Amino acid sequence: MVYATKQSALQSQGSVISSSLAALEVLTPESVDQVMELLDVSPVTRMLVTDQAGRILYDTDQDDSAVGRYGLLAGVSSALDGYAQFTCAYSHARGAFVSRSATPVVSGGNIVGAVYLYDYDTEQGDIIAGLRDNLLNMSLLFGLAGLVIIVVLSSTLTGRIKRLSSAMDVVRGGDYSHRIPVEGRDELSELSEEFNVLTGRLESTEELRRRFVSDASHELRTPLAAIRLLSDSITQSDDMDTATMREFALDIGSEADRLQRITEKLMTLTKLDAGVTGREREPVDMKQVAERTLHLLAPLAETQNVTLVTELGEGCVVLASADDLYQIIFNLAENGIKYNVPGGSVTLSLKAAGNKALLTVADTGIGIPAEDRENVFDRFYRVDKARSRASGGSGLGLAIVHDAVVANGGEIWVAPRAGRGTVFSVAFPLWEKKEGAS
Ligand code: ADP
C-alpha cells in the first residue's frame, strides 16, 4: 500500500514538473529556477532537474548543491532515453522508505531533460517498524498460547488414549466386565463406546461358552456315572444272576447310546457354529425331504400312539442343504411326537406363501409354557427335564434346528397351538430359477 501510494505521488509530481518544464524550449538553470518557483510542489527530500546531457540544472539541496555537475544516476539515464522510472524499497537497517522517480521532460517531441525525485521517508518507516514489532510480539504471544493449548490438549488426549490402552490390557487379561467411562462426544469417546460394545459382546460370548462347556460336561457326566455305577454293580456282586446282569448290560448299552447321541449333536452344533455343515446349499424340494423324514418317524409315532398328519403343498423349492432340512424337520416332528399325549396328533404342513416357503409343525401335545418359549432354542434348555431325559432328549435338538435354519437363511418361531399344543414355524426364501441356469 505504501509502495503504491509513493509511486503514484512521486510519478504524478514528476509528470507535473516535467510537463511544466516542457513549455521551455531550452532548459537552463535560470529558466528552470523560474518555473520551479512558480510551481507549488509538495516537498520531497531532494529534487534534481537535468538537461538532455544529464547535467544538473536545479537541485533542492542548497547546502550541497550539485548544479553544474553531471547526475550519473541510473534513473536519470533511463529517463533521458525516454523511459520514466520508479523504484521504492524499505530499508530495515535505516527504518525508512527510499523512493526514486525519474521522468523525461519532452518538448516538441524531443527529450530535453529529466526530473529526478528522491524521497527518504522515515515516518512511514516508523509505522512499518512499529507494525513489524507488534506483529512479532503478537506472533510470539499466539505461538506461546498455541504451545500451551497443544500441551494441554495432547496431555489430555494422551491420558485418554492411555486409559483406552490399559483397558485393552485388562480385557486381554480376561476381565471382560471392564468398561471405559465414556465422556464427551468426540472420536475417542466413539472409540471407547465401540470398545465397550465389543467387550460386552466378548463377555456374553464368553459366558455362553462357559455355560456350554459346563452344561456339556454335566450332560456327559450323567450317562458316564450311570455306566460306572452299573459296571461296578456287576463287578462287585458275587452272586448276580444272568438275567439281572443282562439287564444291567442293556442299561449300560442304552447309556452309551445316549452318550453317542449327545456327542453327535455337539459335533453338529460345532460344525454349524463354524459355518461348515460339510454340505453345499442347493435347490431342494422341501416336500420330498418332509416325506422321507416322516417315513422314518412313523414307527416312533406308532409306539407313542400319535397320528402323523401331512398337508404338503407343491413348489416349495428352497436353496438349502438337504441334510440340514432333514435335521430341521426330523427334530421338530420328533419333538411333536415325544411331547405329545397318547391319541394326539402332529400335523406337518408345507406351503408357498409370497416369496417364502412356510413349514409348520403343529402338535396337540403338552405345550410349552409362555415363560419358557423364548428359551427353548438355547443349548441344553429343557422345560421338563425328567420327561426330556426319559425320551432320550439332550436339550440340543431345538438349538440345532435354530442354528441350521439361520445358517440356511431362514427364520423360525414358536407359538402355542389354539386349544392345546405347540406350533413351530419355519420360513425360507423360495428359490427362484434364474434364466439360462441349469
Ligand atoms: P430335547 O432333546 O430335550 O427334546 P430340544 O432342544 O429338542 O431338546 O427341546 C428343548 C425342550 O423344549 C424340550 O426338553 C422340551 O421340554 C421342550 N419342547 C420341545 N419341543 C416341544 C413340543 N413340541 N412340545 C412341548 N415341549 C417341547
Image (spheres, rainbow, N blue to C red):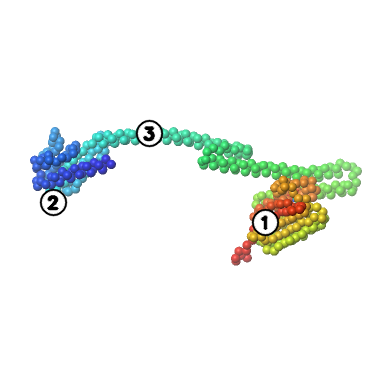
What whole-number distance in Å separates the C-alpha atoms at marks 1 and 2? 105 Å
Q: Which residue is mark 3?
A: 140
- Label 1 crowd (10 A; few <14 / some 14-19 / many >=20): many
Upstream in sequence: badge 3 or badge 1: 3
Tell me the amino acid under the disc marked 3.
Answer: Leu
Nearer-N-terminus badge (3/2):
2
Residue that appears at 13% across and 45% down? 21
Residue 428 x/y as whole percent? 66, 57
Q: Nearer the viewer, mark 1 or mark 2?
A: 1
How far apart in space, not on screen, are marks 3 and 1 (Cα)? 72 Å
Quarter occupied by the N terminus: top left
Q: Are marks 3 and 2 in contact (CB under 8 Å)?
A: no
The C terminus is located in which quarter?
A: bottom right
Contact, CB < 8 Å: mark 3 with mark 1?
no
Q: As shown in the figure, which amino acid type bears the numbered disc 1?
A: Ala
**Label 3's element?**
helix
Tag 2 or tag 1, which sits nearer the N-term? Answer: 2
Kind of residue indicated by mark 2: Gly
Residue 109, numbered label: 2
Quadrant of the rendered structure where residue 228 is?
top right
Residue 47, numbered circle: none
Residue ID for mark 1: 427
Residue at 12% of width from left, 50% of height from top? 108
